[in-house]
Amino acid sequence: MRSGFRSFSRTLVVGALSLSGLALVTFVPASAVGATGSNVSQVSPSATPVESHSGVKVLGWGFDRPAAVTSDATHVWVANWNGDSVTELSASTGALVKVIRGPSYGFDYPCAITSDGSHVWVANHGGIMKSPVGPDSESAPEVELDHQAPDAYGDSVTELSASTGALVRVINASSYGFDGPTSITSDGTHVWVANLYGNSVTEISASTGALVKVIASRSHGFDYPTAISSDGTHVWVVSLVGDSVTELSASTGAPVKLVRGRSYGRPILSDGTHLWVANLLGKSVTELSTATGAVVKVISGSDYGFDYPSDITSDGTHLWVANANGNSVTELSASTGALVKLIRGRSYGFNDPDAIATGGNHIWVANAGDNSVTGLSASTGALVKVVSGSNYGFNNPSAVASDGTHVWVVNGGNSVIELSASTGALVKVVRGSNYGFDNPSAIASDGTHVWVANFWGNSVTELSASTGTLVRVIRGSRYGFDYPDAVASDGTHVWVASMVGGSVTELSTSTGTLVKVIRGRSYGFNNPDAVASDGTHVWVASMVGGSVTELSAPAGTLVKVIRGRSYGFNNPSAIASDGIHVWVANASGNSVTELSASTGALVKVISGRSYGFGDPSAIASDGIHVWVANASGNCVTELSASTGALVKVLSGSNYGFDHPNAITSDGTHVWVANFYGSSVTELPGS
């Protein structure tokens, strides 16, 4: 059981409770209701790209209010409450494997997760706040939630394949009785779900996902069930309001006994011999006998550091308790309950540790406060790593460029991210006032220099492509920069398009000095917002003018202004040239115009539903492939550069596309910047 109930129930209005004076009630068997049927490193997972499928990698996705964690010794699975996603890590290294999200998975405020090694089961609470049903509903606590209204997916369970992370099924039929599912456990044969508002437990077949039964009756004593655990023989259910623990038979689901007391027990764990209940506000842990349900001991005291113990796990030798308010982990001996150590300190990265799991040689702690996971050594409790998804620094990335060795990504946070083109690994985050970044809007690299256009700063920043160090910031009225929003370099010239100024500035790549400012009515510039150069020609797309201007690259002189209905220009927002073809993405026209690079003549206008064009906002070509990023369509269209024919439309949650608005290709890799997703997707270039 790894429940994230605390994440959405920070305030519970219930009378003060403590676990003492327990009364044991033995059940008369009855039919259940329902249908049959030491500090080592600080590591970012983003430094190890996510390879979703077919060589696709998604960089920058991280944790988003991690509410629950589980591990099967090979994989670590983290449920992200705010992110409606599940993050998979390698249990051996803590490296990021993939982030699973998308409407098909049905994630809706996932608050609990469990894995039996073959299946991963995720409980989707849905975020609805309501009173429980059943005979004890009058005693329900008030629950204060910290999120917005849910969508239609709540009250469901998602099953994934543990080996691949692929979706198996979303279970949401009304017959399952899901009503605020808040905790889930599996013993490999059965899956048990505690329904907070339904005052019930749902049993599912682990092999088929079929409903076995819904257990709900007054005799079971369920009263706001918030936690559930199974050891394969017993099933234990904690009722928060009922001050009780219910034992069920794992083989039949029949009630065995009801242990009543006064407890804030919510997290619960059974290893077959011991039953451990963490008392949230009692600052204690209670051990019960699994054979009799009798209290063995109540563990409390300042030395243990219990402070809102929010989750509990065991590897059979050690017992580990996450203290959410204490930002610590308590290690106990599983055989005696004796204190082994209290683990705390800034280096561990504990920040509202809300969930904990053991797998193989590691203990994994989900920190809801700062979207990270801490890995500890199971044998020593020493720090192994802190896994955090924020190190890439992606913040609404709006432009991307690659020279085959480096990938450069422009961020809304006035920074530039450098990645390795061969691995996708983070090289550095370039930021600081000396770089002159001021709403950087475009970037280009020729392999030696990197040029960044600063929209608000009316400047261009030059970086060294080999080191990422600052070369110079180019600014001043003589450069004619007036809200520059596009830049291109062919290795000899740098061309900067100024949207408001209606001009193009030519710079020398070797010195950064001004060559000329090109402006005037004859050039047809009207809100120029895209520029491309192949060394012979310079192509400038004017958004408002619905035209493309061709310049001579060696001389900067006007060749022609291309306009007219036959060209299909409609808010041309991006342009690319490979020296033979010129490709123009028409954002409002949902089309792509192909021109001849040698003559500027129209070759064809490409449009139609099959191409998947949806606000095509960026385009790139490596001479063999043409790649179009569709911002509103959340997909990428691949065309043949030689014929313009459709190759494929790439879409689906595994690609991580989220308003893709920039794209580049170096012939080997394709890089897509996802503005809303604050991520970058790498695709194989062939």
Image: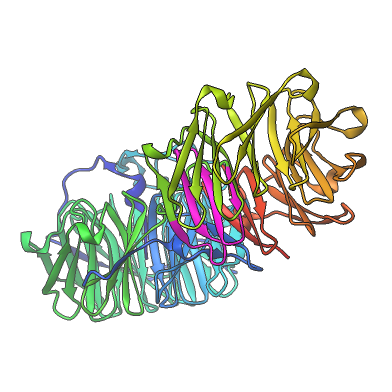
Q: Position of residue 102 (x, y in %)?
A: 59, 52
Q: Residue at x 18, y 70 (%)?
A: 331
Quarter of the picture containing the C terminus is bottom right
Instruction: Indicate whether 661 appears above or below 686.
Output: above
- Report the side of 356 relative to 665 (left or right): left
Instruction: Please state if 404 lies on the left or on the right of 384 as rendered.
Output: right
Residue 639, above or below 575: below
Pick the front one: 329 or 375: 375
Residue at horizontal 19%, vertical 43%?
Answer: 15
Start-end of magenta stretch: 399-427
The answer to whether 76 is drawn above or below residue 621 in the figure is below
Using the image as rendered, state which of residue 608 and residue 598 is in the foreground.
Answer: 598
Quick one: which residue is furthest to the top in this view? 521
Magenta region, mostly helix, strand or loop?
Answer: strand
Q: Nearer the viewer, residue 153 or 141?
A: 153
Q: Is residue 417 magenta?
A: yes
Q: Quadrant of the N terminus?
A: bottom left
Q: Position of residue 194 (x, y in %)?
A: 41, 58
Q: Residue furthest left?
A: 302
Write down the quadrant of residue 67 in the picture: bottom left
The x, y position of residue 387, in whole percent, is 36, 62
Residue 212: where, in percent of width, then height? 54, 68
Asked whether the viewer can see residue 146, the reply is: no
Is residue 405 toward the left or the right of residue 664 in the image?
left
The scheme the figure's colours follow is rainbow
Q: Write the residue at 39% across / 50% down.
A: 65
Tell whether position 557 is magenta.
no
